[in-house]
Amino acid sequence: MIVDLEAAAERIAEIAEEEIAARFGRLAAGDIDTKTGPMDFVTEADHAAEAQLKKALADLYPGAGFVGEEMASADPSALDAIGTAGAVWIVDPLDGTRNFVEGRARFGSVVALVENGETRAGWIYAIPDKAFAMASKGDGATWRGAPLAPLPAPEEPLTGYRAIGNMAEPWKSRLVPRLRGAFETETVSCSAYGYIDLARGVRDFALYSRCWPWDHAAGVLILGEIGGRAEYLDTRAPYDPRATQGRPLLVAGGADRWERARKTLMD
């Protein structure tokens, strides 16, 4: 069962505007907390949006499970539903929370629908731009309502994003010097905008070392629908919506971009 993409987008946008955009620049000190470290923020907007999305998405797909970032942060066993439930919503209610807290207009809401371990639909709502990238499996992807086309061959040199702070050995020693020596990259501050940039060809690739499903499932589907690629460099296994840490995941909006980045990093 695939839900109506537009109906889901309407509810995602409504909740983002009511619970997140309305709080931007208006947070009190008591509205902000931290999780794993001093820069790992969580806010009242995160919690409120996740609660509302859980209700709204249940109405759109009765019986589907639900895994939200804040739910899983409080109870990591919630992630088990992704491998056991027939259908499950995976939600990052506020991606880019640090940007949101610090007043930078680069944050979004990310929702994916997984059925039997396969991502079947995905929505990325770029909240400051009031714009969606979204896709359903086999039906293509859109940005601002217009179809996203396969990307042309990239110009040299390639540019990318990185989130490599959790890279495990021996991959850290092997890949990080090559990444820094061969490419112009910047840190991913918001997965939502990062995947939109990859789909639009603004950046050529991204290298990740910790993969939470709410950060990647929707974006990888969107890239796949335009001929993009997402594989782990250690095993060449394609991405699937399970949490991993330490492994090098390379993603790109086109297979040629992916292969050029892989060749430089690995050969």
Image (spheres, rainbow, N blue to C red):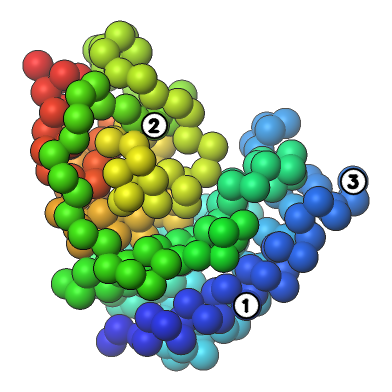
The residue lying at 30 percent from left, 18 percent from top is 183
- 219 and 115: which one is in front? 219
Q: Residues within 10 Å of mark 3 (few under 14, many from 20)?
A: few
- Gap in angstroms between the C-alphas marked 1 and 2: 30 Å
| Number of the front mark, 3 or 2 | 2
- Please, is residue 50 above or below residue 154 in the view? below
Counting the numbered discs, the total is 3
Amino acid residing under circle 1:
Glu
Mark positioned earlier in the residue sequence (3 or 2): 3
* Residue under numbered circle 1: 14
Residue 250 x/y as whole percent: 25, 36
Lateral position of residue 262 relative to residue 172, left or right = left
Instruction: Please give the name of the residue rendered at 62% of the width and 57% of the height, measured from the top-left corner.
Output: 128
User: Who is closer to the viewer here, 11 or 67?
Assistant: 11
Looking at the picture, which amino acid does disc 3 mark?
Answer: Ala
Q: Which residue is mark 2?
A: 161
- Mark 3–mark 2 contact, CB under 8 Å? no
